[in-house]
Amino acid sequence: MSILEAEITQNTPQIETKELMLDLKNLKKVYPTPKGDYIVLEDLNLQIMKEEFVTIIGHSGCGKTTMLSMIAGLNEITGGSISVLGNPIKGPGPDRGVIFQAPSLMPWMTSLQNVLLGVNQVFPHATKKQRNDIAKYYLQKVGLEDAFYKKASELSQGMQQRVGIARAFAIKPKVLLLDEPFGMLDSLTRGELQDILIEIWNKEKITAVMITHDVDEAIFLADRVVMMTSGPKAKIGDILNINFERPRTRKTVLEHDDYYKYRKHLIDFLEH
């Protein structure tokens, strides 16, 4: 057993002592095709604890986004089950916030109005001022205090994604789902938004599940990195515990003795 595997084994019981937030049991997804059923996911099992940040990596087409959309309640489950705090999901709900690769904003609405769309739905009994304060608070947290009243169509792609992050946190979900939210951005903007995301997450401690193709991003953000096997019939192939202290900075992560061990482990998995 390698040092890395020993660390994984040694740390697993510590994770299991926390409250189980998200439970995927024997998950299966099948798409019918003219040539017969195509099995995207099969026998996929994953438990994610309260306040945990999990990143998911795997080759394109292995079913990562399919799995995330099933957790979000946007894609029907063929077999198995998904539950949040023991309650089976039955479609989309405010207990799960989603940040997509494309921000999916209403282009004719302002930043504030876009965030308020969710806030008004989730907090209908709050006063108008209270709902506005919530939306403005999270827009300020992502650095958009000067863009409350700018239309989404007037914002850069990076600024639009900041609105998307604010919108997801503002509804106070139990689980935050992120589908490659920085995948379409340049490296500088990507780094800035990673820092903003982790800063807000450190304060809010919302259970987070994030898909990424970026090994360095996966390590920097996560408590655990989940590796999926290639499809069809994809499942969980390996799980790596990331034992860096929080709050963490990019500099301390890059200088940590274990960083390159973790990186090699993930790249070796992806190359096999």
Image: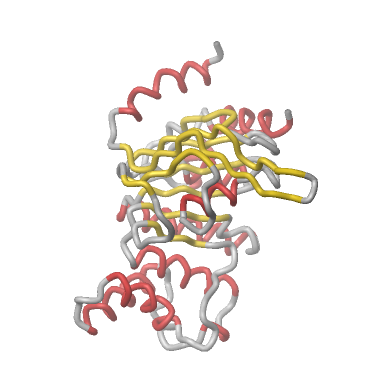
- Is 132 in front, or is 89? 89
Q: Quadrant of residue 190?
A: bottom right
Q: Residue at x 51, y 43 (%)?
A: 55
* Above or below, 103 relative to 233: below
Image quadrant where one finds the C terminus = top right
* Residue 80 higher or lower than 108, as above or below: above
Where is residue 73 shown, x and y percent of the image? 46, 56
Q: Which quadrant, please, contains the N terminus? A: top right
Residue lying farthest to the right in this orientation:
35
In the image, is 143 to the left or to the right of 51?
Answer: right
Residue 270's spot in the image, x, y percent?
A: 69, 34
Horizontal side of 175 relative to 71 (left or right) equals left
Query: Which residue is located at x 46 percent, y 42 percent?
Result: 54
User: Extreme top residue here?
Assistant: 1
Q: Position of residue 173 (x, y in %)?
A: 34, 58
Q: Is residue 264 above or below residue 64?
A: above
Give whichever of 253, 128 is nearer the camera: 128
The answer to which of 168 and 86 lies nearer the viewer is 86
